[in-house]
Amino acid sequence: MYNNARILGGIIVNNNTLDSIVRKVQDMKPLPMVVGQIINITEDPKATIRDLEEVILKDQVLTTKILRVANSAYYTYNRKISTISQAAVLIGFKAIKGIAFASVLNKYMNVELKGYEMEKDDLWQQSQTCAIAAREISKRIKYRDQEEAYIAGLLHDVGKTVLSQYLEDEYGEILKLVEEGSTFDEAEAKVLGFSHTEIGGKVAEKWNLPKHLVDAIKYHHDPDAADDNIMMVNIVHVADAITMMVGIGMGADGMNYKISERALEMLGLDEIGIQDLISTVVDVVQSEENYLLA
């Protein structure tokens, strides 16, 4: 198994596999132009609703999804929302950016990942649930940017789409390490040279995403290692743990999931708070209308 291998920091790295993984990230398609335009508009304090509407109306699928979300029970309103400008006023620029990300990521994540023992819908449902949990945690702690936390939750496991094919061949070795006490991502790193969190961070960098999203993806299994954007990282870490507790799209990597006590302390969450969040997330997920863009 370890022919043509080298040791980096005590970790055995297969050069062929490592090169293939990096190449796969480099070959990933960039985010569609409409998402980049929406990101720029929503981050520009001088941008207007008209600017946003002009971009969105060029994409019929995205237009339909935004109107569906605006008219869902999640955003209760006393009249029908029929235009993007009305939707923008009701749900806000940041929420529209989240919907745009969700619309695009569905194409990347609604796939079977044999290396993680995940069926076609599992990763997408897991990502949606983590995003919802991240938003609910943000509400609970009055975090300043709840919709960015939602987007980070959507993106947190994008690295799995790259690593899955390599896990199929190395799964036995990874499972052995997990049985010996390693977390799944620790085992990934020992066998492949990268964990899905590191690869996800590289994907986010390739897509030129803001550093707070890169950090949330890269450190969501090890929040104590983050030295920047710590609250965002903690939110996604705990949201991911809640997703595992709910049992949605868990796959093989749910084994030996370790939740950071420091993250819980910084977020001000105890066992009762976690149980309350689980109940809230389950309620949202069980409502097909509220399970946005599922």
Image: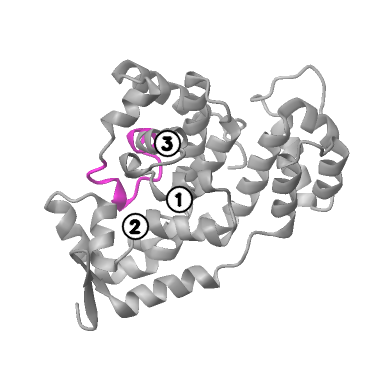
Please tell me which of labels 1 and 3 falls first in the chain: 1
Q: Residue 134: horizontal and vertical position, in percent?
A: 48, 33
**Magenta-colored span:** 242-257
Q: Residue 61: horizontal and vertical position, in percent?
A: 75, 50
Q: Secondary structure at mark 1?
A: helix
The tag on residue 230 is: 3
The residue located at (67%, 35%) in the rendering is 94
The tag on residue 116 is: 2
The tag on residue 272 is: none
User: How far apart are labels 1 and 2 at the CA level?
Assistant: 9 Å
Q: Secondary structure at mark 2?
A: helix
Is 17 drawn above or below residue 181 in the view shown?
A: below
Is residue 112 visible in the rendered image? The answer is: no
Is 204 drawn above or below residue 99 in the view shown?
A: below
The residue located at (63%, 53%) in the rendering is 104
Please tell me which of labels 1 and 2 falls first in the chain: 2
Q: Nearer the viewer, residue 127 or 13?
A: 13
The residue located at (29%, 67%) in the rendering is 192
Provide the residue designation for mark 1: 123
Quadrant showing the C terminus? top right
Quadrant showing the N terminus? bottom left
Task: Bin the neighbour count of mark 3 within 10 Å (Cα to Cα): few under 14, some 14-19, many 20 and up.
Answer: some
User: How far apart are labels 3 and 2 at the CA level?
Assistant: 28 Å
Task: Bin the neighbour count of mark 2 within 10 Å (Cα to Cα): few under 14, some 14-19, many 20 and up.
Answer: many
Q: Comparing marks 1 and 3, which lies closer to the viewer?
A: 3
Q: Residue furthest bottom?
A: 4
Is residue 90 visible in the rendered image? The answer is: yes
The residue located at (24%, 83%) in the rendering is 4
Q: Secondary structure at mark 3?
A: helix
Q: Residue 5: horizontal and vertical position, in percent?
A: 23, 78
